[in-house]
Image: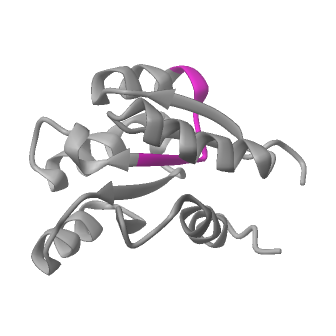
Amino acid sequence: MASKRSILIIIEDSYLAGLYGRKFELDGWRVDIAESYKDGIWLIAKQKPQVVLLQKECLNTDIADGVRELRALPTMQQAKIVLLAKETDREEIQRARNAGADAYLLLGHFVPHEALEKIKELVGDRE
C-alpha cells in the first residue's frame, strides 16, 4: 500500500459517524467527519478523500443533483461516492447511480463492518 487510504464521512448523527469512523480508523484509513453537506464540500477540497460516504439525508437537494455536484468537483473525479440512506426506493437508487454514485447502502441493512468491506471492494483493496 503506497499511501494511506482516506474517507470522508458525511453523516448528520455524530454518534453514528463516530461508529463508522472508528471502524475505518481501526482498518488503517485516514478518516475525516463532517456533520453537514456544506462542511463536507469544504473538507473534500482540503483533504481530497478517496471515498466519500454521504448520508442522503444530509443533502438539501435531489439526490441525483447532489451526486452530480460532488462529481463536478475537481478532487472528486476519481473518488468513490457511497450513499447511505435510512430509506429509499429502486428509482432513487437508479437515479443516484446514473448521476455517478458508486454504491448505495441502506442504514439498518449494512452495519459499519459491512460498509467497510463494500468500500474496500470498491477501491480494490480486498484482503
Residue lying at 54% horizontally and 64% vertically, measured from the top left: 115
Task: Give the percent coordinates (x, y) of residue 22.
Answer: 66, 41
In the shown orientation, is residue 104 left or right of residue 77?
left
Locate the C terminus by quadrant. bottom right
Q: Position of residue 96 (x, y in %)?
A: 23, 64
Q: Residue at x 33, y 42 (%)?
A: 70
- Seen at 35% across and 57% down, the residue is 83
Q: Quarter holding the N terminus?
A: bottom right
As for residue 61 lying within the magenta part, the answer is no
Q: Is residue 18 left or right of residue 104?
A: right
Is 43 in front, or is 112? Answer: 112
Quick check: is 48 in the magenta stretch?
A: yes
> Which one is nearer the viewer's eye here, 8 or 70?
8
Q: Position of residue 79 (x, y in %)?
A: 53, 50
| Count of residue discs | 0
* Residue 9 appears in the picture as rendered: no
Report the span colored magenta: 46-53
Residue 119 position (above or below residue 47) = below
